[in-house]
Every structure is written in C-alpha cells, then in structure tokens.
Image (cartoon, helix red, strand yellow):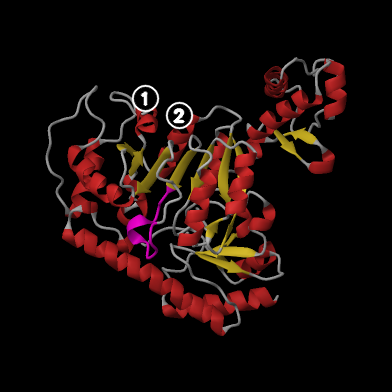
C-alpha cells in the first residue's frame, strides 16, 4: 500500500516507471514491497490500465521489480540478484561437469606462432586487420554468398549485444530459442529488451514458434544454426527452409545467426536467412577452437547493418586490438593449429558419443547431438532433485531450468559437459547419474 513519501506518480508508462525507480533508489520502496494492483493505480492516476501494465513490464525488464503471479508485482532485491553465467563454478571442490568449457589441451598455443608484423595502428585508422579480413571473407562467403560487410568484435556476446543495440530500443521484443544460451538470455534481459521464447525441438527452432513470435512484434531473432547450446541440436534442411519461409514476410526483422561452434561442428551450416532478407548477421567467434580468452569474433552482415554497427565500433573508441586480430589470423592459417582444431572436433564428438552409449547401457536414452555438452532428460524427475543427488556423489551439474525462458523448456533436463572425463570417470558418472535418476 502506498503511504506518504512513497506515492507513485506519472501519466505515461515511462513516467510511472521512473517514479517507482526513484522511490526504490531512495529507499521509499524496499525489496519485497508490493506495487499497487494495476487497476487501483490506474484509477488513482487517471490513466488506462495498459499504461500501468506497460510501466510494470518496464520495471520487471530492468530488474527493478519482480512478477510473482498471484502475489502481484513487487520491488526486486537487486543486491541479491544473481546473473547465471557459463564457466566453472569458482571455488567448488566438486567435479564440475556443467562448465561448458572447451578442453584447454585442445586449444592452440598462442605463443607457438609469430603474428605477421605490421605498422602500429593509431586512433582513426581502420578497425579490421587486412590479413584477418581476407581470411574471414573467404570463410564467410562460402556460406553466405551475397553482398556483405565484415566487422570484428570482442567475441560473439559482444557482437550480439552491439547488433541488437544498433537495431532496437528499450522494451523492444527479441525472439530467442527456448532453452537458450545463457549469454543471450542475459544480453537481452540486461539491455531492457523483452525476450520472446521460441521452442526448440529435435530439428531446431520451431517454425510455429517463430511465427508466433513474429506475430507478437519481435524486432530481432537470435538463432543457433548448429550445435545449439544447451541441447546440441542442429537445424535440419527441412526446418531451415520452413524458417526462411516464415521470415520471408518480415524482411526487416534483424536475424542474427550465432554459429558459435563453426569450425568444430560436424553438422552442416544451414541458414534461416533467405536470399531477399534485408537485415541479417552471421556471427562466428573463435572462442571454442582458439580459446575464450582471445575475445574475438567476425561478423558478416548486410551493408546497412554493418554501417550502423560501425558507429559502435569506431576507430579511436572500441575496436578490437589489431594485435589480437593478427594473432588470430596467424593461428587460422597455421597448419599445426588447424590440425589441432581437427583433433578437437573429433574428440568432442567421440567423447559425447561414448558417454551416450554408457547411458544407453543404463537405460537412459539420449541423442548426443553436436557441441561441447549433452542435454539429458531425467524423465519425470525433478532435475533439481537429481542434481542434488549428484552433488552428494561429488558431481556439479547444471539443471535445464537455468537455460529456460519458459520453465517447461528446461524442466526435467540436465546439461552435462563430459568430454574432459577419462573412461573410468565417465563410467562412474554414468553410474551415479543412473542412481540419481532412480532416486
């Protein structure tokens, strides 16, 4: 209930949201405080209910408020908010099988090559190294033979964030796969966009789900064409064709393909970007095969998108270091480094397939898919309970709900990273997982 000093004011959604934010920042509305019911606040302010609903939606998207269904909308505890991240669980004594990391032994030694020496790059000069640009153009044009421009960013997450920022405004809707890569969920939510869930099945993002998202007015679509994280699914030829057909009536919706596994994938690249689509981008990072710390991705996009992206990656501001670009170019043209990438591709596929066989022997059927991880159904069990039982056996796993926009998309699943386990430890994990599922 509002009291003196905590009265919400405003006539527009923006003004009402700003009033609540100011009260929360000043301590007048503490975490857990319920906001007035929509109808009541609308009547007091003399505005339409939809205006108050839009204001509350903005507050939820910005992390200022939480929606608790029947309990209504309450002020969020922002200090206690945890943003789920990929990677190792810091300080855990448990055996981490949920990290999603590549094998460091299969990453090329960056000090094993000598980058081509070039002149020093100063403020105002080009943002892309010519040697990397030549290599990347050949690589990308093979899969996207159309007019394009090349941009280099500080990794795939940076690329997606900048691509969305040049096309969207606060509150715009973005179609995301469900379940979804954690970084994409965080990028969309933290920027104040509204994520719209598109289900993923055995053939990839569903056409019906994408159609429904477009009907809701999404301004951008983020899709993983192969080695989807967390499920390992890759687009089938039929599904990619269906998605292109759905998108054909929306040529100015920005379509971003995050082909994160690219050189390591055993699946074919199949694009959902039709030949006449106006706004598109293909993002390929080097994190999985050259190393996450290299912080580099190449982006192919239509000229309009590239020009707008250039305003956010300008000379003298936020370009990616030419030292890193030259190092990446040297590694990508080095025979020994490329041979290691081939070994890594075979290793990840082999270890995942072997673990799937171990589970099959124990009555747990899974489809290994592609990528660094396995998406495992625990049946009618609660994934949290199964995860707790694994904890007691010394294993740290990731539950599927952490990757879900809509809880059913991740319910009853675990995502496991097992490629680093030897045969003995893989068999032990398979035993422990079977016992944990049995309860």
Check whether the beta carbons of the residues at disc 2 and disc 1 lie within 8 A of each other. yes
Relative placement, left or right, of 10 versus 255 is: right
In percent of the image, x 12 and y 36: which residue is there? 118
Query: Residue 211 location in percent, x, y?
Result: 60, 46
Q: In what quadrant of the picture does the C terminus appear?
A: bottom right
Residue 397 image-quadrant placement: bottom right
Q: Secondary structure at mark 2?
A: helix
Label disc, if present, on residue 311 of the rendered structure: 1
Q: Read off the magenta span.
A: 258-269
Please tell me whether residue 391 belongs to the stretch shown in magenta: no
125 shown above or below 420: above
Where does the image place residue 193, in percent across and percent down from the top left? 58, 34
Tell me the SS state at disc 1.
loop
Q: Quadrant of the N terminus?
A: top right
SS assignment for the magenta stretch, majority: loop
Residue 262 quadrant: bottom left
In the picture, the disc for residue 166 is 2
Task: Decide which of 104, 150 is in the foreground and name it.
Answer: 150
């Amino acid at each position: 209930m509002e009291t003196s000093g905590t009265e919400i004011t405003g006539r527009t959604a923006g003004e009402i949201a700003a009033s609540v934010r100011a009260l929360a920042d000043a301590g007048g509305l503490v975490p857990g405080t319920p906001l007035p019911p929509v109808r009541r606040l609308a009547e007091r302010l003399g505005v339409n209910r939809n205006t108050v609903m839009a204001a509350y939606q903005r507050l939820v998207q910005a992390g200022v408020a939480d929606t608790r269904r029947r309990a209504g909308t309450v002020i969020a505890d922002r200090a206690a908010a945890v943003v789920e991240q990929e990677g190792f669980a810091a300080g855990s004594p448990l055996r981490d099988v949920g990290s999603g990391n590549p094998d460091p032994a299969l990453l090329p030694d960056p000090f094993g090559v000598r980058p081509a020496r070039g002149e020093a790059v100063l403020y105002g000069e080009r943002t892309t190294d010519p040697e990397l640009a030549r290599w990347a153009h050949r690589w990308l044009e093979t899969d996207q033979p159309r007019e394009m421009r090349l941009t280099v960013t500080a990794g795939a997450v940076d690329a997606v964030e900048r691509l969305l920022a040049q096309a969207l405004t606060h509150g715009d809707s973005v179609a995301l796969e469900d379940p979804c890569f954690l970084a994409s969920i965080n990028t969309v939510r933290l920027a104040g966009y509204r994520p719209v869930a598109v289900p993923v099945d055995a053939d990839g993002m569903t056409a019906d789900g994408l159609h429904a998202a477009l009907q809701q007015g999404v301004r951008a679509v983020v899709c993983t064409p192969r080695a989807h994280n967390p499920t390992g699914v890759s687009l089938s030829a039929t599904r990619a064709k269906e998605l292109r057909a759905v998108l054909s009536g929306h040529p100015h919706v920005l379509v971003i393909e995050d082909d994160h596994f690219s050189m390591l994938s055993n699946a074919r690249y199949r694009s959902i970007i039709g030949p006449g689509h106006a706004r598109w981008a293909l993002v390929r990072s080097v994190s999985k095969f050259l190393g996450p710390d290299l912080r580099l991705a190449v982006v192919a996009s239509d000229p309009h998108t590239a020009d707008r992206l250039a305003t956010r990656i300008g000379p003298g501001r936020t370009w990616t270091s030419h030292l890193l670009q030259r190092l990446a170019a040297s590694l990508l043209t080095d025979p020994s480094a490329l041979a290691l990438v081939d070994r890594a591709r075979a290793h990840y596929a082999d270890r995942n397939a072997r673990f799937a066989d171990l589970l099959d022997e124990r009555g747990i059927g899974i489809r290994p898919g592609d990528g660094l991880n396995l998406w495992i159904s625990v049946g009618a069990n609660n994934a949290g309970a199964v995860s707790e039982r694994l904890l007691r056996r010394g294993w740290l796993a990731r539950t599927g709900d952490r990757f879900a926009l809509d809880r059913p998309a991740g319910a009853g699943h675990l995502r496991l990273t097992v490629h680093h386990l030897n045969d003995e430890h893989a068999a032990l994990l398979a035993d422990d997982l079977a016992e944990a599922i049995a309860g």
